[in-house]
Amino acid sequence: SICLVTPIVEINFLPNDWSPNITNKLIVCGSFIWTPKRLNLQRLLSSKSLSELEEKGMELMIIGRAKNKEIVKGNKIKGVFVSGEVKSVEPFYKEAALAIVPELAGGGFKLKIAEAVQHNLPIVAIKGAVTDLEMKDGIHYIEVDSYEDLITEAIDLLNDKEKVKKLVNNANLLFKSKYSLKENSNRIQKIIK
């Protein structure tokens, strides 16, 4: 017998009185050393809609390893902060109101999606970035067709607190039922029995 054990992502159920973290910060998290991920980020940073961030008084935080020249280049863009390597992404997720996943290339289970769900952030992703077939566009996250749309959709979504709450709650419930230690234990116990 074969048992597929998923990554374990511990999620706490949202309290009934939970409300979205509304700040002026969006987050893109990852390691941008690998060429496909670096290219994804470059496409996002060259999108025309990026100028909307500054107009709306918002900031795009790009958190994770990157080549020094990419960090310097990114930090020259108004409304963008590129951190480079950090000890912990935790403080940045706590500041963020929404997670953007610009992964057109590069597949597999994306840690940044799990991190966003763990931090109760709504997710806006480019088409094909979310590879979990149980995560549905419009139910657990928002999917867009282009890099231009990532920023505009993120800004629009943050203006709809009820939609944010619904997306976050649905993603939270899905991850709790699919990726918890308890669910993985149950899968293994069924195989053993």
Image: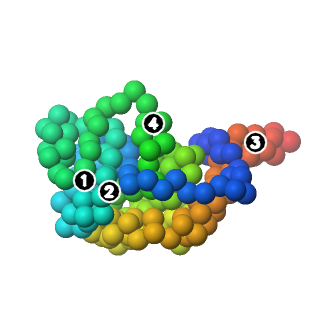
- Circle 2: element type: loop
What residue is drawn where x is 20% and y is 36%?
67
Instruction: Answer left or right for 12 relative to 136.
Output: right
| In this view, the mark in front (3 or 1) | 1
What's the residue type where badge 1 is placed?
Gly
What's the residue type where badge 4 is placed?
Pro
Q: Observer-nearest residue: 134 or 46?
A: 46
| Residue topped by disc 3 | 182
Q: Quadrant of residue 53?
A: bottom left
| Residue topped by disc 1 | 79
Image coords of residue 164 (percent x, y): 54, 64
| Residue topped by disc 2 | 58
Q: Is the residue marked by circle 3 packed among few (<14), some (14-19), or many (20+) residues within 10 Å?
A: some
What's the residue type where badge 2 is placed?
Met
Evaluate whether residue 127 shows in this view: no
Image coords of residue 97 (percent x, y): 46, 54
Q: Are marks 3 and 1 in contact (CB under 8 Å)?
A: no
What residue is drawn where x is 60% and y is 57%?
19
What number is the disc on residue 91?
4
Image coords of residue 162 (percent x, y): 58, 69
Disc 2 to disc 4, C-alpha distance = 17 Å
Q: Mark 2 or mark 4, which has the lower sequence index?
A: 2
Q: Are marks 1 and 4 in contact (CB under 8 Å)?
A: no
Disc 1 to disc 4, C-alpha distance = 19 Å
Q: Observer-nearest residue: 180 or 11?
A: 11
- The image shows residue 93, relative to residue 40, as above or below, that is above
Q: Mark 4 or mark 3, which has the lower sequence index?
A: 4
